[in-house]
Image (cartoon, helix red, strand yellow):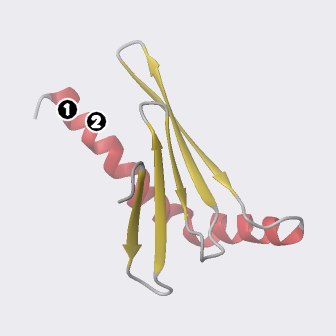
Amino acid sequence: QTEETYTFHEDGEPAVTWECTFDPPRSRMMSAPDAPWSDRVDYFQPVHAGTYWTIVWEPKGYGSSSITQWVAFQLKHRREARRRIVLPVLEHFRSLARGS
């Protein structure tokens, strides 16, 4: 951790190092500087009794490499990303709403 930047090392093939920068309570940016992975920005906006959460993927490639990366994500990694990234957050907030 350095000021508002946190570094996480993800095991796997290939191993990825993520740098997370926060602008509380508005946003979080995740970047994998040494990998071809897309950067990700999460925006949080208060809405009534909750929060509107928007995830924006920012491809590092341009032109056909960007399109290829998007198609590969849609076909191969989308379900896994949703299972590992989105669902744990949704379950956390659902359990808070149930009071458990």
- Residue 27 higher or lower than 67, as above or below: above
Q: Which residue is mark 2?
A: 93
38 to 93, vertically: above or below: below
Helix, strand or loop at mark 1: helix
Mark 2 lies on a secondary structure that is helix
Q: Amino acid at mark 1?
A: Leu
Q: Which mark is residue 28?
A: none
Q: Are marks 1 and 2 in contact (CB under 8 Å)?
A: yes
Q: Amino acid at mark 2?
A: Phe
- In the image as oriented, which residue stretches furthest toward the front? 3
Return the residue nearer the eye: 83 or 42. 42
Residue 48, picture quadrant = top left
- Give the image location of residue 47, x and y in percent: 45, 17
Image point (78%, 67%), residue name: 61
- How far apart in space, not on screen, are marks 1 and 2 (Cα)? 5 Å
- Identify whether 63 is placed above or below 97: below
The dot on residue 96 is 1
Q: Which quarter shows the C terminus?
A: top left
Left or right relative to 51: residue 96: left
What quarter of the picture does the N terminus occupy? bottom left
**Which residue shows up at 40% across the image and 65% down it?**
7
Residue in the foreground of this view, choosing between 62 and 98: 62
Q: With 1 as the anchor, is 59 left or right in this view? A: right
Location of residue 53 in the rendering, given as x and y in whole percent from the top left corner = 49, 34
